Amino acid sequence: MNVPTLRGSRLDDDRRNQLLTVVRAEGGEWTAGRAWALYRDRGWAPCRATARKDLQVLARRGHLVERGPENGRIYTLNHARSPPMNAWYAVGVLWLLAGIVTRWPHLLDWADRLLGRDRDGGA
């Protein structure tokens, strides 16, 4: 999948949002080279300068913390700005469970039988 890199376009924002999602999921230190490798793995393959610029934009927006020398910048997640990944995971799980219970309420009865409980609170 090739993603065009027109400046200021919605496609740029989509690419940056996907990069931020991966940074939140994987954590650690991010360099332009690591972001560029991610882009190549996903088939986007813009140039290394695009990956560097995306990291700079995310840092300017407060999502990442930028540190290190100008020719070797390292970016990490700004935990003061971004909720921890486990909070996002919990929200996703609750959303999924709510959808399952809404669509298939009989699953609650099955789970109770599996756990040896009845619906009236008995064990």
Image (cartoon, helix red, strand yellow):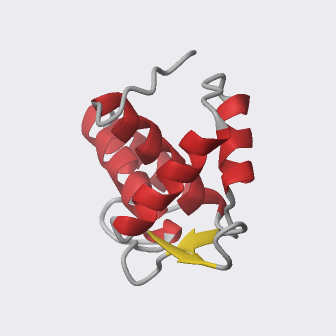
User: Looking at the image, which is closer to me, 57 or 70?
Assistant: 70
The image shows residue 110 at horizontal and vertical percentages of 47, 43
Residue drawn at (60%, 29%) of the image: 46
User: Looking at the image, which is closer to me, 123 or 51?
Assistant: 51
The image shows residue 29 at horizontal and vertical percentages of 69, 69
User: Looking at the image, which is closer to me, 84 or 77?
Assistant: 77
Left or right: residue 44 versus residue 79 is right
Q: Can you see residue 97?
A: yes
The single residue placed furthest to the front in the displayed view is 71
Residue drawn at (48%, 42%) of the image: 18
Left or right: residue 60 versus residue 78 is left
From what the image shows, is residue 74 above or below residue 113?
Answer: below
Left or right: residue 112 versus residue 60 is right
Q: How many badges with numbers are in the image?
A: 0
Residue drawn at (66%, 59%) of the image: 26
The image shows residue 28 at horizontal and vertical percentages of 69, 69
Q: For the N terminus, which image quadrant?
A: top right
The single residue placed furthest to the bottom in the displayed view is 80
Q: Can you see residue 113?
A: no
The image shows residue 94 at horizontal and vertical percentages of 37, 56
From what the image shows, is residue 117 above or below residue 3?
Answer: below
Residue drawn at (58%, 52%) of the image: 52
The single residue placed furthest to the top in the displayed view is 1
From what the image shows, is residue 25 above or below residue 64?
Answer: above
